[in-house]
Amino acid sequence: MDWDLSKPEYFNQLLGGTGCLYPPHSLYKDIYDSEKAMKLLPTNDDIYFWAMTVLNHTKIGVAKGFKGDLYQMNLGSSLSSENVILEKNCNTNPFEIICNEYNQIIDILNSEEDDE
């Protein structure tokens, strides 16, 4: 099937309730580790799924004309030096939690910023 997609980027984060398609082999192996997912982000599976795509070096495309929820991460000049808040009024930052567990995410995202 040929999809008319926006430029795929790591910085696109789809929200599951909007109809996400994860093609075969697009997610990192830890997607099957439900205990880890529940320990890290028990109420934020969208960030966990996003991290699994980035860790697998899968960029996220968005179908042109898509009218659902899309979060475009604007992480500033340097991911390693910025404190990124993805949820307002939250005592823990899910992005920080997942990046502390998988610190290679920062390198992957910085490589995309460097390519632009």
Image (cartoon, rainbow, N blue to C red):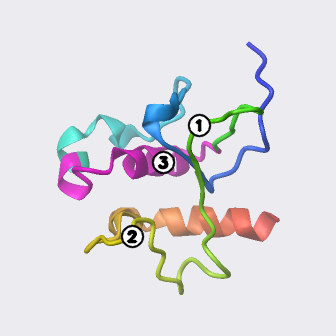
Q: Residue furthest bottom?
A: 81
Judged left or right of residue 69, residue 46 is left
Disc 1 residue crowd, few under 14, some 14–19, many 20+, Cα 10 Å: few
**Marks 1 and 3 close (CB-CB < 8 Å):** no
Q: Which residue lies under the disc numbered 1?
A: 68
Q: Quadrant of the N terminus?
A: top right
The mark that comes first in sequence, 2 or 3, is 3
In this rendered view, identify the residue nearer to me: 6 or 30.
Answer: 6
Residue plotted at (63% across, 53% down): 10
Residue plotted at (34% across, 45% down): 45
The mark that comes first in sequence, 1 or 3, is 3
Q: Quadrant of the C terminus?
A: bottom right
Residue kind at label 2, given as amino acid type: Lys
Image position, residue 5 (x, y; %): 77, 33
The span shown in magenta is 38-59
Q: Name above or below for residue 76 compared with residue 44.
A: below
Residue plotted at (30% across, 34% down): 32
Q: Name above or below for residue 19 compared with residue 57.
A: above
Distance (Cα) linking label 1 and label 2: 20 Å
Distance (Cα) linking label 2 and label 3: 19 Å
Q: Which residue lies under the disc numbered 2?
A: 88
- Callout in the foreground (1, 3): 1
Q: Which residue lies under the disc numbered 3?
A: 50
Residue kind at label 1, given as amino acid type: Gly
Image position, residue 60 (x, y; %): 63, 42
Residue kind at label 3, given as amino acid type: Trp
Main SS type for the magenta part?
helix
- 32 falls in the magenta region: no
Image position, residue 43 (x, y; %): 25, 50
- Callout in the foreground (2, 3): 2
